[in-house]
Amino acid sequence: MSDQPEVDPEPVVPEALPEPDPLRGSVASRTWAALFALTVLLVVTVVFVAQNTDPVTLHLFGWTWNPPLAAALLAAAALGLSVALIAGSLRIVQLKRRVRRKSRS
């Protein structure tokens, strides 16, 4: 025991929350930004296709065909994107299953 009188601690006053920034991002602003980016991508793709119409010869497993260069490159990019999306999706499913198993035990 001490000879000093007990002093009640000072009440804790919560700090005032800062005012939200009126220029902060919103769903609408992100949507407009994405729409702008997709429009630029579409214009670049149209220009690319218009400038690469020369036919190329492709050979695969005995098949031969002559698509325009732009079509062949866009098809290859789409196939690569599809493979990446499938691999990424499978990894996400794998991780979700692992988390579910850990949460059960």
Image (cartoon, rainbow, N blue to C red):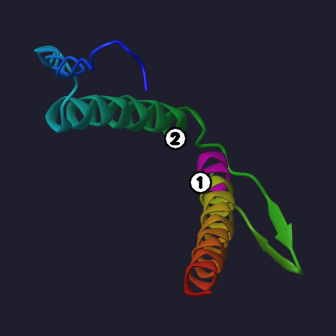
The answer for how far apart the CA atoms under marks 1 and 2 are is 7 Å
Is residue 81 shown above or below 83?
A: above
Amino acid residing under circle 2: Val
User: Which residue is labeled 2 in the image?
Assistant: 49
On screen, residue 61 versus residue 65, left or right, reads: right
Dot 2 falls on a residue whose secondary structure is helix
Residue 18's disc number: none
Quadrant hosting residue 84 = bottom right
Nearest the camera: 43 or 28? 28
Dot 1 falls on a residue whose secondary structure is helix
Quadrant hosting residue 32 = top left
Q: Would residue 73 be counted in the magenta stretch?
A: yes
User: Which class describes the residues within 10 Å of circle 1: few (<14), some (14-19), or many (20+)?
Assistant: some
The quarter in which the N terminus is drawn is: top left
Reading the chain from its start, which is encountered first: label 1 or label 2? Answer: 2
- What residue lies at 10% left-to-right and 15% top-to-bottom? 22
On screen, residue 14 versus residue 5, left or right, reads: left
- What residue lies at 60% left-to-right and 38% top-to-bottom? 52
User: Which residue is labeled 1 in the image?
Assistant: 71
- What segment is highlighted magenta in the picture? 69-74
Q: Main secondary structure of the magenta part?
A: helix
Amino acid residing under circle 1: Ala
Quadrant hosting residue 59 = bottom right
Rendered location of residue 95, percent (x, y) = 64, 71
Q: Would residue 13 be counted in the magenta stretch?
A: no
Nearest the camera: 100 or 47? 100
Rendered location of residue 64, percent (x, y) = 80, 72
Contact (CB < 8 A) between labels 1 and 2? yes
Rendered location of residue 20, percent (x, y) = 14, 19
On screen, residue 23 versus residue 46, left or right, reads: left
Is residue 84 shown above or below 64?
A: above
